[in-house]
Amino acid sequence: MICVDNHIDLIMVTYESQLSLPTFFQSLRKYTKLPFRLLVIDNNSTDQSKVFLQAKLQDKYFRDKMQLVFKKKNLGVRKPGTKR
């Protein structure tokens, strides 16, 4: 989170987050008082995360505050003992 000129820049990375996304967005709407911008980076989820996030772009509250990036490959941290 970065706070500049009384607004907050939020960056969220998701992967297979379909179940937690609704709670995140409800909390963001309810508890974030300062103006904000949200960058969401999805690491190639195969659940319904992408569909949910795209629908949020249609939500009047989030439309102008949110930017989505969909990665073609999950670039997250690898598990110990595995090779890339």
Image: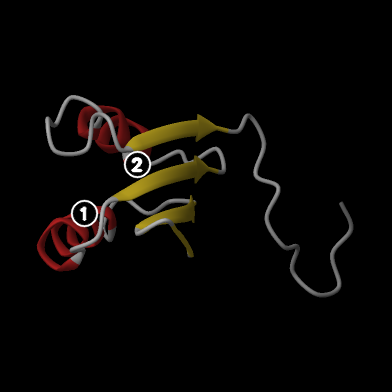
| Disc 2 residue type (three-letter) | Ser
Give me the residue at 67% from left, 36% from top: 73
Mark closest to the chain's N terminus, 2 or 1? 1
- Image quadrant assignment for residue 34: bottom left
Q: Nearer the viewer, residue 66 or 71?
A: 66
Give the image location of residue 51, x and y in percent: 29, 30
Crowding around mark 1 (Cα neighbors within 10 Å: few <14, some 14 to 19, many 20+) is some
From this viewpoint, which residue is outermost toward the front? 5
* Badge nearest the viewer, 2 or 1: 1
**Residue on which the image places disc 1:** 25
Residue 28 as seen in the image, left or right of residue 76: left
Contact, mark 2 vs mark 1 (Cβ under 8 Å): no
Give the image location of residue 66, x and y in percent: 34, 37
| Disc 1 residue type (three-letter) | Phe
Give me the residue at 37% from left, 54% from top: 17
Give the structural element (helix, strand or loop) at label 2. helix
- Image quadrant assignment for residue 64: top left
Give the image location of residue 53, x and y in percent: 31, 36
**Residue on which the image places disc 2:** 49
- Image quadrant assignment for residue 32: bottom left
From this viewpoint, which residue is outermost toward the bottom? 80
Residue 65 as seen in the image, left or right of residue 82: left
Give the image location of residue 3, x and y in percent: 45, 63
Residue 74 as seen in the image, left or right of residue 39: right
From this viewpoint, which residue is outermost toward the top? 58
Give me the residue at 87% from left, 51% from top: 84
Give me the residue at 75% from left, 63% from top: 78
Give the structural element (helix, strand or loop) at label 1. helix
Q: Nearer the viewer, residue 15 or 56?
A: 56
Crowding around mark 2 (Cα neighbors within 10 Å: few <14, some 14 to 19, many 20+) is many
Q: CA distance from mark 2 to mark 1?
A: 12 Å
